[in-house]
Image (cartoon, helix red, strand yellow):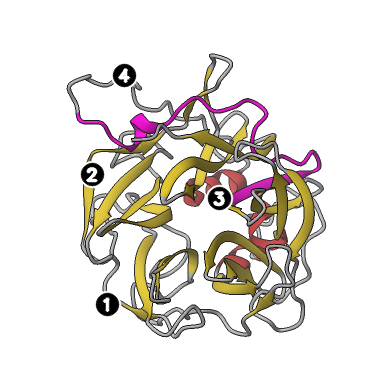
Amino acid sequence: MKRNDFLKALSAGILLPSLVGANPLKNILEPEGFLDRLLPAPVGGGFMMEDYWIWDPAVIKDESGKYHMFASRWSKEVGFGNWVTNSEIVRAVADKPEGPYTFVEVVLPPRGGDWFDGKGAFNPRIVRYKDQYLLYYVGVNYDFPIPQDKGNIWADERAHKAWMRKRAGLAVANSIEGPWKRLDKPLMEPRPGKWDASIISNPSPVVRPDGSVYLMYKSSAKNYDPPLLLGAALSTKGYKGPYNRLSESPVFSFHNSGQPNNDVEDPFVWWEKDHYEVIMKDRFGHICGEEGGGIHATSKDGVDWKLSSPVKAYSRHIKWDDGKTIHMANFERPFLLFENGKPTHLFAATGTGPGMYQVDKTWNMVIPLKQV
């Protein structure tokens, strides 16, 4: 999320105007990119709950042919900014990938106690390996009660403390319906004095055929101020780890001294034949030309990445199947559903409102992909 401006706006009581995205027209002579595969989004598709903020879609098909969406939710009795303190992970079900998805259960509530996820869980990513379901997520704990008031937690120290306690975790089940067994400890810890000294967040796993797991994650040197950076780790001994960093440096770093506010987040990584691919959010729009738009990149080893040409993967300008094109307040946390080894649908968290993070409602939407 482009949280730096969001936090400053909230703290100052200022609403920032939404920035207009890039011109959607493209030269027909340009090579086809990921963006060109996006079909109109179904109105009424995806997952929404009237009394909750909804975020973080992760979808998988079970053995019976039903589709299960794991998502983050938190009550609308508190503000949208409480995602960092009040989230829990839920499961919803649909008969087709477009949905609509119906809420079934809370999967990962706050674990309580001194656990790293004692006060909340969000950022789910669901993977199946052999006969097990692997639910990667981010947990938080902090030294104050879970907020129930309508106060602005970003205007005091509460949200800041919670943000710094973000750690990636894993829950495992033999059935999509659970029960889910959480690992006792985070998958990785920040490294003081390094580029990833603050948090371990936004985990995006790729489980290889041999059971080893490639994991991309988000961190920063200090706090939520830009630049946010992405790193990569590998567990050669299965999903429980240990996850060892593949590089001492971040694998994605776009900032410089003159432009610190140039970074990416929300990676979704997958293996395509003989290489990795990733889509992720261009927070400030300096890479793809649209604030909050998406970019695409490829890599042979998961460390050295090359931006695609064209680089743009998705836009906040959404074409709906009723013929309308709407500039959404947000389009974040992209997730691809794969069927028979091919990506078929792009899911993302979205919302409506006057600008980025100034939302009146949020939900997880879905975009079918043109098959190539």
- Where are the magenta residues, as a range? 31-58
SS assignment at label 1? loop
Give the residue drawn at x 52%, y 70%. 130
Location of residue 48 with respect to 228 vertically, above or below: above
Nearest-to-viewer mark from 4 and 3: 4
Q: In front here: 101 or 66?
A: 66
Location of residue 320 with respect to 70 vertically, above or below: above
Nearest-to-viewer mark from 3 and 1: 1
Q: Label 4 sits on what residue type?
A: Leu
Nearest-to-viewer mark from 1 and 4: 4
| Residue extending furthest toward the front | 64
Q: Quadrant of residue 186?
A: bottom right
Mark found first going from the N terminus, 2 or 1: 1
Mark 3 → mark 2, Cα distance in angstroms: 32 Å
Mark 4 → mark 3, Cα distance in angstroms: 33 Å
Within the magenta stretch, is there residue 37?
Answer: yes
Circle 4 is placed at which residue position?
A: 25
Q: Quadrant of residue 85?
A: bottom right
The answer to whether residue 62 is left or right of residue 309 is right
Q: In front here: 259 or 166?
A: 166
Of the numbered discs in the image, which one, if any, rests on residue 248?
1
Q: How far from the left and from the top, in percent, is residue 312?
A: 31, 37
Circle 3 is placed at which residue position?
A: 7
Q: How far from the left and from the top, in percent, is residue 49?
A: 76, 41
Type of secondary structure dominating the magenta stretch: loop
Of the numbered discs in the image, which one, if any, rests on residue 308?
2
Q: How far from the left and from the top, in percent, is residue 206?
A: 41, 65
SS assignment at label 3? helix
Mark found first going from the N terminus, 1 or 4: 4
The answer to whether residue 278 is left or right of residue 152 is left
